[in-house]
């Protein structure tokens, strides 16, 4: 995208924001429509496809057996990865994971891990020797903004509907993943003096700062991620957290439905 076009887009979005408007007609505190489909991938232990507006993300869960980490011999292992392919957006490239892909995976992983979503101790087969390894793979299909929240919902939905294939490895009957939480992230961008929930791609491109807040079912903050070079005031952070708690409750209800 040329600098001229970028400045034209920036001026348009800022001009609308100064009038309390967004390009797609939403209020600043309004998220796009969310839809969730389960069981998309037949070969996966669990999967979900999430559409957040025009953003489309596929998440698959695979489970195998491996050796536990030395510092946590009685815990199963959670690993989250993301690939940003040209299929989702022309600016994405093939090859090793980009910084954006690594950040996306880390934000999703941190929300799951820090909320205690999975009881990893129940995924130990023989402590110190064998444990179940849970792999969460995030694959954006169409990037129209806010991959963080779409990927988080997809990961949580896929994990909640995953089955541990114990019989495949000769360890008894299959069983559901031991899920005990449902974290939900809410992402904001700041353009000038205006803060917008669930940004579109165009809003992300002109934003000065980005903030992702992940909360658990009690509304407690489990993770936060600040992006871009701009800053938030303490009051703005407080407002974002309060809104994230309220909006997350609606999303969580949809995930659990």
Image (cartoon, rainbow, N blue to C red):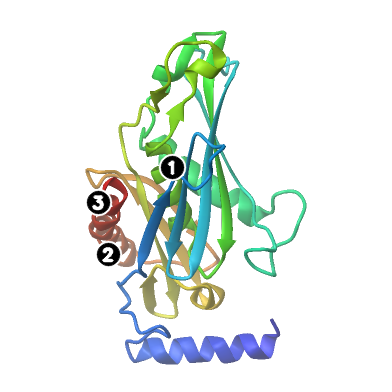
Question: x, y (%) of residue 70?
Answer: 58, 14
What is the distance, in whole Å, between disc 3 and disc 2 at their CAs? 22 Å
- Please tell me whether residue 186 is drawn above or below residue 119 in the rendered image: below
Residue in front for this viewpoint, 87 or 102: 87
Compared across the picture, whether 210 is left or right of 255 comes to right
What is the distance, in whole Å, between disc 1 and disc 2 at their CAs? 30 Å
- Which quarter of the figure has residue 33? bottom left
What is the distance, in whole Å, between disc 1 and disc 3 at their CAs? 15 Å
Q: Is residue 190 visible?
A: yes
Total marks shown come to 3
Q: Identify the element where label 2 is drawn.
A: helix
Q: Is residue 71 visible?
A: no
Question: What residue do we see at 46% from left, 14% from top?
Answer: 124
Question: x, y (%) of residue 200?
Answer: 47, 73
First reached walking from the N terminus: tag 1 or tag 3 = 1
Residue placed furthest toward the front:
42
User: Which quadrant would the N terminus be assigned to in this image?
Assistant: bottom right
Provide the residue designation for mark 1: 158
Provide the residue designation for mark 3: 253
- Which quarter of the figure has residue 87? bottom right
Question: What residue do we see at 34% from left, 69% from top?
Answer: 31
Mark 1 residue crowding within 10 angstroms, few (<14) / some (14–19) / many (20+) = many
Mark 2 residue crowding within 10 angstroms, few (<14) / some (14–19) / many (20+) = few
Q: Identify the element where label 3 is drawn.
A: helix
Provide the residue designation for mark 2: 239
């Amino acid at each position: 995208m040329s600098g001229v076009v970028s400045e034209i887009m920036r001026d348009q979005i800022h001009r609308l924001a100064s009038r309390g408007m967004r390009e797609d007609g939403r209020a600043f505190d309004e998220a796009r429509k969310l839809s969730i489909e389960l069981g998309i991938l037949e070969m996966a232990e669990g999967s979900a496809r999430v559409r957040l507006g025009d953003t489309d993300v596929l998440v698959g869960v695979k489970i195998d057996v491996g050796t536990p980490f030395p510092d946590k011999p009685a815990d199963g292992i959670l690993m989250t990865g993301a690939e940003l392919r040209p299929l989702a957006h022309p600016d994405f490239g093939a090859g090793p994971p980009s910084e954006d892909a690594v950040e996306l995976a880390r934000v999703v992983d941190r929300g799951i891990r820090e909320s205690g979503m999975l009881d990893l101790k129940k995924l130990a087969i023989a402590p110190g020797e064998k444990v179940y390894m849970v792999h969460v793979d995030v694959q954006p299909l169409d990037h129209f903004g806010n991959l963080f929240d779409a990927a988080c919902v997809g990961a949580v939905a896929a994990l909640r509907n995953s089955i541990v294939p114990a019989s495949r490895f000769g360890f008894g009957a299959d069983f559901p993943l031991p899920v005990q939480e449902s974290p939900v992230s809410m992402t904001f961008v700041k353009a000038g003096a205006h803060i917008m929930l669930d940004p579109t791609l165009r809003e992300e491109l002109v934003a000065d700062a980005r903030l992702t807040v992940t909360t658990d079912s009690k509304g407690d903050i489990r993770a936060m991620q600040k992006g871009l070079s701009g800053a938030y005031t303490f009051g703005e952070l407080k407002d974002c957290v309060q809104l994230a708690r309220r909006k997350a409750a609606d999303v969580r209800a949809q995930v659990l439905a």
